[in-house]
Amino acid sequence: MIGHRILSAFACGTVMVLGQVAPAAAQITEQSRAAAEREAECGSLFNSVGPFDYRTRDSTPQRHWDDQDTTRNHYDPASRRIKEGELSERVLADIDFLLREYPNHYPALQLLMDYDSRGGKTYGFRTPDCYFERARRFQPDDLTVIMYEAYYWLKKGNHERARQAYEDALTLDPGSADANYNYGLFLANAGEYDRALKHAQVAYAAGYPLAGLRRKLEQAGKWQPPPAPARPSAVQPEAR
């Protein structure tokens, strides 16, 4: 009888564990499916010129030379032509080359946003959404890419996507002064002052230099300075 009870308990425990494993396995399967769909839509990262992490462009003499060569032959011409008002296929071809070599190429992403905001066409290349997806898929820990994406969606008027990008940035680095400031500004503009204040306090406590968010909160009567850090208690002399 006792043996039967032990076996029954063991069996119940096994079912419970399996029940916990099943949702986790389903989640992994769903994530894999979503990743496959993103790659099918936006393309593999691997190609004849990359990918390389833009943050490592000066890590070796060869990487530095490659970056300088790419800048001269692709970034500089695209930047000059956009400033002159040219939104041609060759401009986007240069941007595409940069973002295939370095999916997280910060200046190229800025060029892409400028090109798109001026009404540039895709000419059969990828959409800005795909270029950001590729950059994040390539280096998920790159906070700068996520902040650029948030700014892109904000300028496009897609506040839902901008909010999600800001929240992704803060998930990656909750203490980032830049992410907290910009998300706080976003929230203040949306009238979410209490939430904006929390992010403003983190940003200013971390030394963020711009006062725009604080002024917005002051104008709304919602500003409160960050709490002073707790002082360590004085060490009491040892009794003799």
Image (cartoon, grey):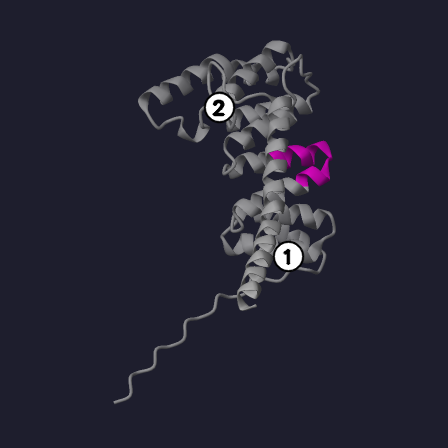
84 is higher (above) or lower (below) than 18 = above
The amino acid beneath tag 1 is Leu
- Taking the image as shown, residue 236 lies to the left or right of residue 42, namely left
| Residue identifier under label 2 | 102
Q: Nearer the viewer, mark 2 or mark 1?
A: 2
Residue 28 badge: none
Occupied quadrant, residue 221: bottom right
The amino acid beneath tag 2 is Tyr
Q: Quadrant of the N terminus?
A: bottom right
| Chief secondary structure of the magenta portion | helix
| Residue identifier under label 1 | 197
156 in the magenta segment: yes
Name the element at disc 2. Answer: loop
Occupied quadrant, residue 240: bottom left
- Measure how far apart labels 2 and 1 are at the Cα level: 36 Å
> Quick check: can you spot residue 113?
no
* Residue 157 drawn at (x, y percent): 73, 35
First in sequence: mark 2 or mark 1?
2
Label 1 neighbour load within 10 Å: few <14, some 14-19, many 20+: many
149 is higher (above) or lower (below) than 212 = above
CB within 8 Å, label 2 to label 1: no
In front: 46, or 211?
46
> Quick check: can you spot residue 72?
yes
Magenta segment? 149-162
